[in-house]
């Protein structure tokens, strides 16, 4: 993973709306940076106030916002996680079906 260029802490987070603001190194509220949940690619949880965030800056529609952000100390979802979860469900279904067939055959 590439190194993010900026570091700050979550100063405000509206979980129901999926966005918040990062307090920068200047510790000045006027310098807070907007962050949207979509900028936290593959994080295994949503940010919380006080979390340390590493991020890059971009300008969109004349406004600065955080992108490519990660939460310090929080592991991202692994890219194979969805595959492993699906595989677990499929294998469990096959085993359950086989056991049900064996039990039904033994009872009859």
Image: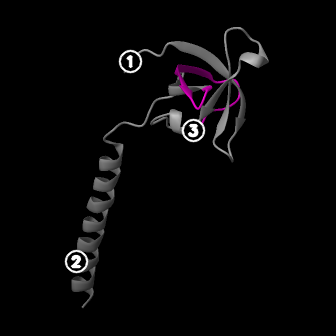
| Part of the protein shown in magenta | 46-63
For image coordinates 78% across by 18% down, the residue present is: 29
Residue in the foreground of this view, choosing between 63 and 77: 63
Density class for disc 3 (Cα within 10 Å; few <14, some 14-19, many ≥20) is: some
Q: Is residue 35 left or right of residue 56?
A: right
Q: Is residue 17 above or below residue 105?
A: above
Q: CA distance from mark 1 to mark 2?
A: 52 Å
Specify the label residue 95 is tagged with.
Answer: none
Give the mark, 1 or 3, whose residue is nearer the N terminus.
1
Q: Quadrant of residue 104?
A: bottom left
Residue identifier under label 3: 37
Q: CA distance from mark 1 to mark 3?
A: 19 Å
Colouring of the image: one colour
User: What secondary structure is marked by label 2?
Assistant: helix
**Image spot of residue 88 (x, y percent):** 31, 54
Residue identifier under label 1: 2
Residue 22 in magenta stretch: no
Mark 1 touching mark 2, by CB under 8 A?
Answer: no
Residue in the foreground of this view, choosing between 50 and 64: 64
Q: Closer to the observer: label 2 or label 3?
A: 3
**Image spot of residue 90 (x, y percent):** 28, 61
Mark 2 touching mark 3, by CB under 8 A?
Answer: no
Q: Is residue 81 left or right of residue 12?
A: left
Q: Is residue 7 left or right of residue 22?
A: left
User: What secondary structure is marked by label 3?
Assistant: helix
Q: Is residue 67 left or right of residue 34?
A: left
For image coordinates 77% across by 13% down, the residue present is: 28
Give the mark, 1 or 2, whose residue is nearer the N terminus.
1
Residue identifier under label 2: 102
**Image spot of residue 36 (x, y percent):** 59, 36
Residue 54 in magenta stretch: yes
**Image spot of residue 108 (x, y percent):** 24, 91
């Amino acid at each position: 993973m590439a190194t993010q260029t900026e570091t700050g802490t979550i100063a405000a987070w509206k979980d129901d709306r999926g966005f918040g603001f990062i307090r920068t190194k200047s510790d000045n509220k006027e310098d807070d940076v907007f962050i949207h949940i979509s900028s936290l690619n593959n994080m295994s949880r949503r940010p919380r106030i006080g979390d340390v965030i590493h991020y890059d800056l971009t300008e969109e529609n004349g406004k600065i916002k955080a992108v490519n952000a990660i939460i310090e100390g929080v592991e991202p979802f692994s890219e194979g996680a969805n595959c492993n979860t699906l595989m677990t469900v499929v294998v469990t279904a096959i085993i359950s079906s086989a056991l049900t067939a064996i039990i039904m055959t033994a009872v009859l």
